[in-house]
Amino acid sequence: MRSAIFRQYDSRWDSLAYPTKSYSFSGNGCGCCACTHLIIEQDKYKNYTPKNVRPYMVNQGFATKGHGTTWNGITETLEHYGYTVKRPNISSSMSAAWKELNKGGRAGILLFRAGSRGGVTWTSGGHYVAFLKYKYENNKHYFYTKDSGGRKNDGWHCYETTMKGLLPQMWIVTLPKQTTTSTTTKKPATTTTKLKTKTATKAAQSYSGSIAGSYKTTDELNIRNGAGTEHKILVTVPKGTKVKNYGYYTKVSKTKWPLVQFTYKNTQYTGFCSGKFLKKV
């Protein structure tokens, strides 16, 4: 998943027409932002922003005066950028949506109507929000969202707790396999060679005992994109998850944050976690 989160009010595009200057992007561009969050998951569009996608949506007539983006415009934009789109009928039941999402590797867009649930307000009108991950745990469904609006409802949200009754429509796509994943998995072998230097060797010795090998998490554990709690959480895994540790530390080795790789919910992750929550197996 790409780290970028696009906001409608970003100064790079907030004043652009959507579709006219009287209906600017800042107030109407949530559909374009939501589409862009999915479009950048494809390697050839990884550097795109809403500024790149907006012209196509405006020229095709998908941007409306005062009503944001048309439903069909969401579908056709995603298809234009290479996705096969599914729109399960969720008006009476979510069963078709859960069936598709449970296949794994799915992402999409949620359309919210006005309202609040579980202390979370998504919109006072209508609002498109992209989700990049989905999981089912403890008989509940969770979406990892990227919200372009000012409320910034980004991160994991439980459908039953914060969304039920607020979704008139949903779009689902299958995420592509990114070449960046294979690049990331090659990094440990390159970095391990640095253990031959005095600095790296000293860093590895700052942790008692050998850390290379297979481990299990001893508690629910956040995996981050850097060594330390200030870094972004990639995924939260449950107690007992098997991980492979590469046996070296970064420059912030005193915090004892090893780099691990593992597969969870049919997705491979590489990231950092607190070493105190790992037990060798």
Image: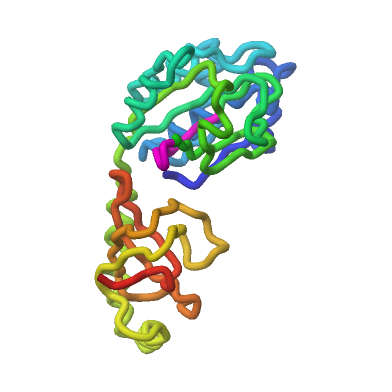
User: Is residue 89 shown to the viewer in this render?
Assistant: yes
Residue 76 is inside the magenta segment? no
Q: Position of residue 200 (x, y in %)?
A: 38, 82
Q: Splitting the image into 4 quarters, where does residue 83 fall?
A: top left
Residue 241 point in image, percent of width and height: 32, 58
Q: Quadrant of the C terminus?
A: bottom left
Residue shown at 56%/34% (left/top)?
161
Is residue 106 or residue 216 the one in the foreground? 216
Q: Residue at x 28, y 44 (%)?
A: 266
Instruction: Residue lying at the far right in this picture: please name it.
Output: 22
Q: What residue do we see at 30% from left, 70% from top? A: 246
Q: Considering only vertical position in the picture, is 150 above or below 233?
A: above
Figure colour scheme: rainbow
222 or 118: which is nearer to us? 118
Whole-percent x, y for residue 56 in the image = 50, 20
Q: Identify which residue is drawn at 74% across, 16% down.
A: 22
User: Which quarter of the picture shows residue 258?
Assistant: bottom left
Whether residue 126 is situated above or below residue 261 in the rendered picture: above
For residue 23, which quarter of the picture? top right
- Name the spot of residue 244 as percent of width and height, x first: 28, 65
Q: Is residue 137 magenta?
A: yes
Q: Is residue 205 left or right of residue 156?
A: left
Q: Is residue 35 left or right of residue 244?
A: right
Residue closest to the far front:
139
Rendered position, 242 above or below 58: below
Q: Which residues are the magenta region?
A: 129-139
If the image is split into quadrants, where does the N terminus sit? top left
Kindly tell me whether residue 135 is visible in this rendering: no
Give the main secondary structure of the magenta stretch.
strand
